[in-house]
Amino acid sequence: MSSVSERNGVPVAAYNKATTQDEALVAYGPEEADAYKKAAGYVRKILDGAQVGKLPVQLNTHFYLSVNMQKAKKLGIQIPDSFLSRVDEEVE
């Protein structure tokens, strides 16, 4: 069974890398494990008595890029080697 993107010939870019398993051609976003570790650090600071309003804002620093090679083939898209060299995960 073909996906909506395949039926319409439109590649999908997503935020969640799990979507490259099914629907998306590429996914790019923050690494969730890193975000959870930072959240745990915030919780520890709060439990230790830190004032929530005085805690610094933390931004994500680790990002991932995944590409579904099977989806690219079905859509007739050639992924350049220069792009693939930056990919964290290739889904076959």
Image: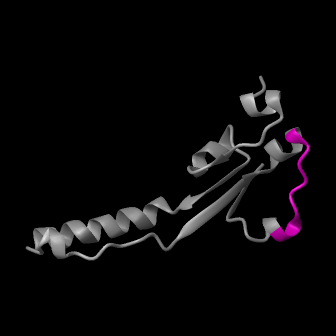
Quick check: is 14 in the magenta stretch? no
* Residue with the most extreme left position: 49
Residue 24 image point, x, y percent:
69, 43
* Residue with the most extreme front position: 53
User: Along the horizontal axis of the image, is 54 left or right of 25?
Assistant: left
The residue lying toward the viewer, choosing from 60 and 20, is: 60
20 is higher (above) or lower (below) than 87: above
Question: Residue 83's quadrant in the figure?
Answer: bottom right
Residue 52 image point, x, y percent:
16, 69
Magenta stretch mostly in which secondary structure? loop
The residue lying toward the viewer, choosing from 78 and 33, is: 78
The residue lying toward the viewer, choosing from 14 and 19, is: 14
Question: Residue 12's quadrant in the figure?
Answer: top right
41 is higher (above) or lower (below) than 13: below
User: Along the horizontal axis of the image, is 19 left or right of 45?
Assistant: right
Q: Residue at x 36, y 73 (%)?
A: 58
Q: Residue at x 62, y 43 (%)?
A: 19
Quadrant of the rendering where the N terminus is positioned: top right
Question: Residue 8's quadrant in the figure?
Answer: top right
Query: Magenta segment range?
Result: 75-82
